[in-house]
Image: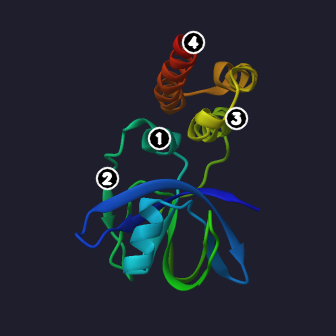
Amino acid sequence: MIHEVIVTTRNSAGQVHIAPMGIHWRDNRVVISPFKPSTTLENLLKRRDAVINYCDDVRVFAGCLTGHYEWPVQQALKVDVPRLQDALAHSEVRLESIEEDELRPRLLCSVVHDANHRPFRGFNRAQAAVLELAILVSRLERLPRSKIQRELAYLRIAIDKTAGTREHEAWGWLMDRIDGHLGQMEAGQ
């Protein structure tokens, strides 16, 4: 099972990198599989620490794909990487081993600290729609126009029925990106 989270890392100069990512668990270890090349991969290989942020604010996911990177962070307790200030919970992890792969190496990490910050109040269908749209945006270059339009039509139902302010804002950022891409597709035809 893949869990959609926000991974924070720090580069060798100390700069924080925030990235949405799907992770999974294997034998009590977190498996992070970033594509090559990626800043998350580079940072984890150099510093060997990361924070897995469990977040219900879908603006963070959408923002990382649309140029909105300024999210409040605070220092984690056991690793030299910050966590998202508004995360529901977080896991501080340390890289243990690497399973090499040409496209997506698997980084197996042990949890060195877990913390809960506030309760999870349940899912909103619009949150799931924004996450799916964010994944779609991350793959726009590989998808035909018809697939993009079909997915948009379906996901918009949940936005229209259940979205709050955060979901509408995140949806708008992602739609700006999609509209720009579709416009470029039209100009190229």
Three-letter residue code for mark 2: Pro
Name the residue beneath numbered marker 1. Answer: 65
Regarding mark 4 in the picture, which secondary structure is present there? helix
Closer mark to the observer between disc 4 and disc 2: 4
Regarding mark 1 in the picture, which secondary structure is present there? helix
Mark 1 burial class by Cα count in 10 Å: few <14, some 14-19, many 20+? some
Q: Position of residue 58 (x, y in %)?
A: 53, 41
Screen quadrant of the C terminus:
top right
Q: Position of residue 178 (x, y in %)?
A: 54, 24
Name the residue beneath numbered marker 2. Answer: 72
Name the residue beneath numbered marker 4. Answer: 186
Please, is residue 62 above or below residue 122 in the view? above
Three-letter residue code for mark 3: Arg
Q: Position of residue 21 (x, y in %)?
A: 57, 56
Front position in the image: 49 or 117: 49
Distance between mark 3 and mark 4 Cα atoms: 31 Å
Left or right of residue 120: residue 117: left
**Marking on residue 125:** 3
Regarding mark 2 in the picture, which secondary structure is present there? loop
